[in-house]
Image: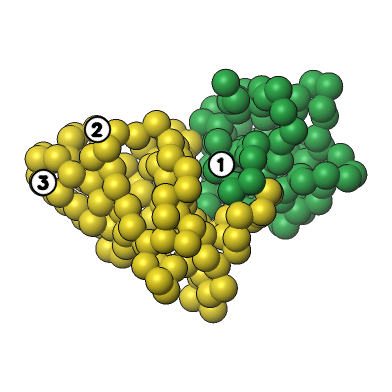
Amino acid sequence: DAGVTQSPTHLIKTRGQQVTLRCSPKSGHDTVSWYQQALGQGPQFIFQYYEEEERQRGNFPDRFSGHQFPNYSSELNVNALLLGDSALYLCASSPGQGAGTEAFFGQGTRLTVV
Amino acid sequence: AQSVTQLDSQVPVFEEAPVELRCNYSSSVSVYLFWYVQYPNQGLQLLLKYLSGSTLVKGINGFEAEFNKSQTSFHLRKPSVHISDTAEYFCAVTFNQGGKLIFGQGTELSVKP
């Protein structure tokens, strides 16, 4: 089992550009969540996808959007990049929506905005 | 609003010494609690979780944590640490189905020989 895989591992973008990050969940998992981890901070919840719909959303602007495909993989899109969007973006997958379900995290994508 | 506070940003400790990493949360509803570890340039790995039942929870790598509802705490402990335990540790809570996690700021554990 490959676990949760994210691509790319590192990315450098210029302010104002758009970026797409990708995530393949652990085998058997149908729920994908995205988190932003700024340097020296804990991860902050961006949103969660289940059955190809956004189910929960954190306190992030509309510049952050996502998608989930029928095979449960997911994309995170960020438009009009700001310097403050530089962070480690973590994808987590879990088997369903049950309370207390364990989330498995990928290695993350390190985004640097210059 | 629900929140998680990790009381120590850095904890230096010598190898084979005991360690406690402190975590407090605030919530008016029932919670589920987690501790994750993050090694440099890696994602998060679950150490242990509390869902219900016994308040003392044992996890991987010899770690354990105790849920104290009256003090709204979930402190992580290990009786004897190793150099390889050097990492960032995050306490997290979830309050509802769906599993949105709210994380603390993290505690950097540094184990010295």
Q: In front: mark 1 or mark 2?
A: 1
Question: Where residue B5 sits in the image (x, y, percent)?
Answer: 60, 25
Q: Quadrant of the C terminus of chain B?
A: top right
The tag on residue B101 is 1
Q: Is residue B89 left or right of residue A91?
A: right
What residue is pinned by disc 2?
A: A84
Q: Secondary structure at mark 3?
A: loop
Q: For the residues tagged 1 and 2, is the chain the same?
A: no
Residue at image position (71%, 56%) is B61
Question: Quadrant of residue B104 in the image?
Answer: top right
Chain the render paints yellow = A
The tag on residue A17 is 3
- Is residue A8 shown above or below A112? below
Q: Label 1 is placed on what type of residue?
A: Leu
Question: Where residue B6 sits in the image (x, y, percent)?
Answer: 60, 27
The residue closer to the viewer here, A8 or B106, is: A8
Q: Cα distance, mark 1 to mark 2? A: 22 Å
Residue at image position (59%, 47%) is B99
Q: Cα distance, mark 2 to mark 3? A: 13 Å
Chain the render paints green = B
The residue closer to the viewer here, A10 or A62, is: A62
Sequence-wise, the earlier of marks 2 and 3 is: 3
Question: On what subunit does the disc labeled 1 rest?
Answer: B
Q: Residue furthest right?
A: B54
Q: Secondary structure at mark 2?
A: helix
Q: State the scheme by which the image is colored.
A: by chain
